[in-house]
């Protein structure tokens, strides 16, 4: 029993992360000079806009889709919030956000919602899994 408990303590923190379900509308945002856009790391990007007014930057890479078929639709997303670390290229002259906490190690940290599955409609009704069908 002690060996099992000790083994569990050695598991990566990512395995302990709790999945959660967020409901809202997926919105496509254009690139802008904002921390949210920098966190998304690309041109246009997707966010989940929830009823409480929060916007969550979405990461669909673990879901085998880009999420574009759910733009402007109300969905329930299952996944987890993860810290994204963007490492600064030492040879680059890019403009980038800096830490507000004064602990700038050259890297930028932000939070994204890693999507595991998508259900269209409020409360998961009209279920449509976002993973493409293989032909």
Image (cartoon, grey):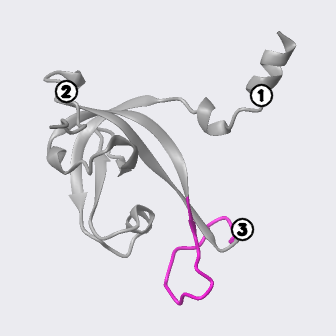
Q: Find the magenta span and give its range.
A: 85-104
Local crowd size for mark 3, using a 10 Å CA cut-off: few (<14), some (14–19), many (≥20): few
Which residue appears at 70% of the width and 70% of the height? 102
Tag shown at residue 9:
1
Tag shown at residue 122:
2
In the orientation shown, which residue stands out farthest toward the right?
2
Residue 3's spot in the image, x, y percent? 84, 17
Q: Is residue 127 above or below residue 30?
A: above
Mark earlier in primary sequence (2, 1): 1
Q: Nearer the viewer, residue 35 or 133?
A: 133
Query: Which residue is label 3 attached to?
Result: 103
Which of the two marks, 3 or 1, is nearer to us in this view? 1
Number of marks present in the image shown: 3
Q: Quadrant of residue 123?
A: top left
Look at the numbered discs 3 and 1 and tell me whether their residues touch, using CB distance below 8 Å.
no
Local crowd size for mark 1, using a 10 Å CA cut-off: few (<14), some (14–19), many (≥20): few
Which residue appears at 23% of the width and 46% of the height? 26
Residue 66's spot in the image, x, y percent? 26, 51
Q: Nearer the viewer, residue 130 or 81?
A: 130
Q: Is residue 1 part of the magenta span, yes or no?
A: no
Residue 12's spot in the image, x, y percent? 68, 37
Q: Main secondary structure of the magenta part?
A: loop
Describe the element under mark 3 as helix, strand or loop.
loop
Q: Is residue 98 part of the magenta span, yes or no?
A: yes
Mark earlier in primary sequence (3, 1): 1
């Amino acid at each position: 029993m002690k060996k099992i408990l000790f083994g569990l303590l050695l598991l990566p923190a990512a395995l302990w992360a709790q999945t959660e379900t967020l409901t809202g509308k997926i919105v496509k945002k254009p690139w802008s000079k904002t921390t949210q856009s920098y966190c998304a790391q690309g041109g246009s990007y997707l966010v989940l806009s929830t009823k409480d007014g929060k916007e969550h930057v979405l990461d669909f890479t673990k879901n085998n889709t880009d999420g574009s078929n759910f733009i402007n639709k109300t969905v329930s997303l299952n996944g987890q919030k993860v810290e994204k670390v963007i490492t600064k290229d030492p040879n680059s002259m890019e403009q980038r956000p800096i830490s507000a906490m004064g602990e700038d190690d050259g890297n930028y940290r932000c939070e994204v919602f890693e999507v595991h599955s998508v259900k269209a409609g409020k409360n998961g009704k009209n279920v449509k899994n976002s993973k493409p069908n293989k032909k």
